[in-house]
Amino acid sequence: DADLVDAISVCKVRAIDVAIQRSHALRQEVGSYALMHHTGFELMDMFLCCKFAEGDSRILQMKLMRDRLKQVKKDGAGKALLDAIMPGEDRAENMAALSLARKLAPAGRDLEKMAALMDEHWREIYDLADMISDRHQRDGKRSSFVEPIVNRFWPSSSSYDEDWKEKLSPRAEGWKASDDEVEPLVA
């Protein structure tokens, strides 16, 4: 199923991008802690490996664009034009696909011309791939995944624990220092 293949491509591209963005934002929040050993941050380069393993994310985006343009060709110019002017959620994607198909058409089957046109219109290619990804995320089948999609970071707490140092003490449970247990600073 071509739609399933596209959905898998979208998941791979978007999941890795979100993981890299969120990890980078977290690194910015924790500062120098991110540089320390055994904090987990030393494993962040694995996200970069994931972005390029099993097909570079950009290659998958170009595949999404290519498949969309094949659909435009299969449906014909009339349907593509009608889809592009009809109001609806996919109107921008339809217009972008039709516009890009028109811009790449002069290359025909000449690979050198196609490469030159793709270099010239690379922004439109990735914009169309993003629109396709947005459509898959918006219209895709929903599952019963237990965690919701989060649009922003939530704070880890809403209050500050004033006596956090006391809780670090091995005798913290029910222990209060008395004056005779505390050594004076000046003798």
Image (spheres, grey):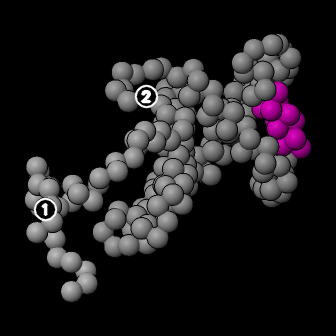
Disc 1 is placed on an element classified as loop
Report x, y in % for residue 94: 77, 25
User: Is residue 181 toward the left or the right of residue 126 in the image?
Assistant: left
Identify the residue at horizontal 51%, vertical 50% (top origin).
22
Would residue 167 be found to the left or right of residue 152 on screen? left
Q: Which mark is residue 178?
A: 1
User: Secondary structure under badge 2?
Assistant: loop
Dot 2 alpha-carbon crowd within 10 angstroms: few under 14, some 14 to 19, many 20 or more: few
Q: Is residue 137 left or right of residue 50?
A: right
Q: Nearer the viewer, residue 23 or 137?
A: 23
Q: Is residue 131 left or right of residue 95?
A: left
Residue plotted at (67% across, 39% down)? 129
Graded by Cα atoms within 10 Å as few (under 14), some (14 to 19) or many (20 or more), the crowding at tag 1 reads few
Q: 169 above or below 68?
A: below
Alpha-carbon distance for marks 1 and 2? Answer: 49 Å
Residue 90 lies, with reference to residue 54, above or below; the image says above
Where residue 85 sits: x, y (%)?
86, 17
Indicate whether 5 appears above or below 163.
above
Q: Give the image quarter of residue 39.
A: bottom left
Q: Is residue 170 magenta?
A: no
In which image quadrant can residue 135 be found?
Answer: top right
Looking at the image, is mark 1 or mark 2 nearer the viewer?
Answer: 1
Q: Nearer the viewer, residue 160 or 54?
A: 160
The percent coordinates of residue 114 (x first, y second) are 80, 51
Q: Nearer the viewer, residue 185 or 26?
A: 185
User: Where does the magenta region start and end?
Assistant: 95-106
Label 2 sits on residue: 148
Q: What's the amino acid at mark 2?
A: Pro
Check if residue 97 falls in the magenta segment: yes
> Residue 151: which disc?
none
Depth order, front residue of 104/10: 10
